[in-house]
Amino acid sequence: MLSLPTSYAEPATHQADSVSEIAGRVVWGKRLLDLLIATLAMLLVMVWLVPLLSIVIRLTSPGPALFVQLRTGRNGRLFRCLKFRTMSYEPNAQFKQATKNDCRVTRIGAVLRKTNLDELPQILNVLRGDMSVVGPRPHPIALDAQHWHTLPHYPSRYTVKPGITGLAQVRGHRGETAQLIDMAHRVRLDRLYIQKQSVWLDLKICWWTATSMIKGDKKAC
């Protein structure tokens, strides 16, 4: 049996260690960025905006202010994802994707969706470690079930923590995935993000998301 000389074997080992070290720095840098952004959001925005929006939601439509839904997290682990309720309250309603001009969406809900403010409570998911600020969006379990075993590379989008916002969302693939090609494009961008992820890329995606919030997202439904 042939064996490589030590002079050839060592560089490969050093290279693997170097890649692992770089990946570790990215993970720690990303977590620190998550905690920084989430803490600032809590102190500067959530302490007053969450109670205000909660009151408006409760006054304009019957039902709770928050919508809690089981979603898929990293490595397929389920977690309780928080959102502001943007639709009419229907206990035990079956999953159905929101569509353009969906009659279930309330007036305040339409504004929250257009500005991405419906996702604001997920800052708490970030602090708990269920989510990251930036990453592939977590899908409802029923939507995952449609594509998990049939769409190529679909499960790979869950090799990292899901995010409040992501590359796919800021590149126009947010909202309803009416056609299979819509989901395929989203998965392609999610996988590209996982491959290229860095603190700098996260900061750019956060900036693009903030810009979209100010302008209003046309694909929100």
Image: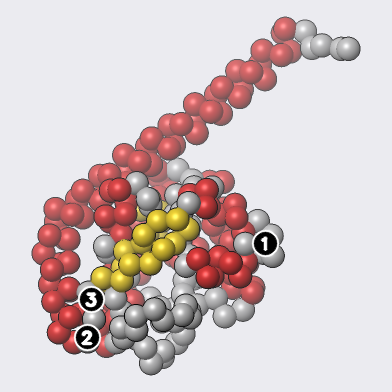
Spatial CA distance of label 1 from label 3 is 35 Å
Q: Mark 1 points at which residue?
A: 149
Element at label 1: loop
Q: Is mark 3 on a helix, strand or loop?
A: loop
182 and 156: which is toward the camera: 156
Give the mark nearer the N terminus: 1 vs 3. Answer: 3
For mark 2, what is the residue? 62
Q: What residue type is labelled 2?
A: Pro
Front in this rendered view, residue 155 or 77: 77
Q: Is residue 211 visible?
A: no
Q: Residue 64 carries which label?
A: 3
Percent from the top left, x then y, of residue 62? 22, 85
Q: In this view, does 33 lie to the left or right of 146?
A: left
Left or right: 54 as drawn, with respect to 84: left
- Is 177 situated left or right of 78 in this image? right
Distance between the alpha carbons at the discs numbered 2 and 1: 38 Å
Q: Which amino acid does label 1 sit on?
A: His
Q: Residue at x 37, y 50 (%)?
A: 130
Mark found first going from the N terminus, 2 or 1: 2
Query: Does 111 sit above or below residue 149?
Result: below
Q: In the rendered view, tell whether residue 123 sits above or below residue 19.
A: below
- For mark 2, give the secondary structure: loop
